[in-house]
Amino acid sequence: MQDAITAVINASDVQGKYLDGSAMEKLKGYFSTGELRVRAATSISGNAATIVKEAVAKSLLYSDTTRPGGNMYTCRRYAACIRDMDYFLRYATYAMLAGDPSILDERVLNGLKETYNSLGVPVSTTVGAIQAMKEVTASLVGADAGKEMGVYLDYICSGLS
Ligand code: CYC
C-alpha cells in the first residue's frame, strides 16, 4: 500500500534525486486537502450503514437483481451484496485518506472480477450500484470531498470493467 507521500518519494528515490518542483506541488496539494479528507472520512464512517442502505435502495432494491432468479435473490446473496458495498465504501475511504489508489488494487480488485464472473455476480449492475453510492456519499460530505471520494469509487468501477 502506498500513499501520496510515499508515491512521490519513491518516484524521486528511483532517480536518486531530491523532490523537484512538481513533486513538491503534489505534496502541497495533498497537505492542503488533508483536513477535508479527514472530515469526509469521519462523516463517512459515522454514516456508512445509511450510505450503503440508500445506495442499494436507489439502484438495486425491487429490481430484476432482487427478484427470483436475480443474483441478490435469497437473503444470503442479498447480505453478500450489502457486505461488498460496505467493503467498497470502506476501502475507497482508506484510499481517499491516503490520496493513492494502490490499496484498492491490493485488497479489493485483485481477483474480484474473476470471482464475480465465476459466481454470476453481474459486473455492470455492481458498477451502477457503486455509482449510486458515489452520489449518496457526495450529498453527505459535500461537493469537494465527494469529488475526491468519486476518484476512488470510479477506480473500483474501472478495475471491475
Ligand atoms: C460474493 N463477493 C462475493 C465473494 C467475494 C466477494 C470474495 C465470494 C465469497 C462470498 O460469497 O463471500 C467480494 N470479498 C469481496 C471483496 C473483498 C472480499 C470485494 C475485499 C475486502 O474479501 N450481487 C449483485 C449485486 C452485487 C452482488 C449487484 C452487490 C453490489 O447482484 C454481490 N457478491 C455479491 C453476491 C455474492 C457475492 C450476491 C454471492 C454470490 C453467490 O455466492 O452466489
Image (cartoon, rainbow, N blue to C red):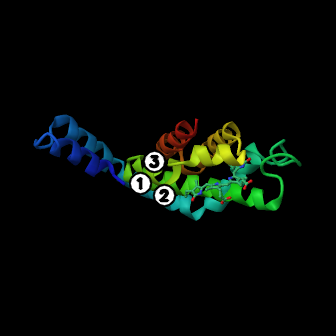
Is residue 139 visible to the viewer in this orientation of the structure?
no
Residue 97 seen in render: yes
* Disc assigned to residue 97: 1
Quarter holding residue 23: top left
Q: What is the x, y in percent for residue 148?
A: 46, 43
The residue pinned by badge 2 equals 41
Badge nearest the viewer, 3 or 1: 3
Residue drawn at the location 28% of the way across and 46% of the way down: 7
Left or right, 130 with respect to 146, comes to right
Figure quadrant of the N terminus: bottom left
Q: CA distance from mark 2 to mark 3?
A: 20 Å
Residue appearing at x 77%, y 61% in the figure: 76
Residue occupying image coordinates x 31% and y 48%: 4
Q: Are marks 3 and 1 in contact (CB under 8 Å)?
A: no
Foreground tag (2 vs 3): 3
Image mark for residue 105: 3
Q: Residue at x 85, y 46 (%)?
A: 62
Secondary structure of the residue carrying tag 3 is: helix
Disc 1 marks a residue whose amino acid type is Leu
- Dot 2 or dot 1, earlier in sequence: 2
* Residue type at the position of mark 2: Ala
SS for callout 1: helix
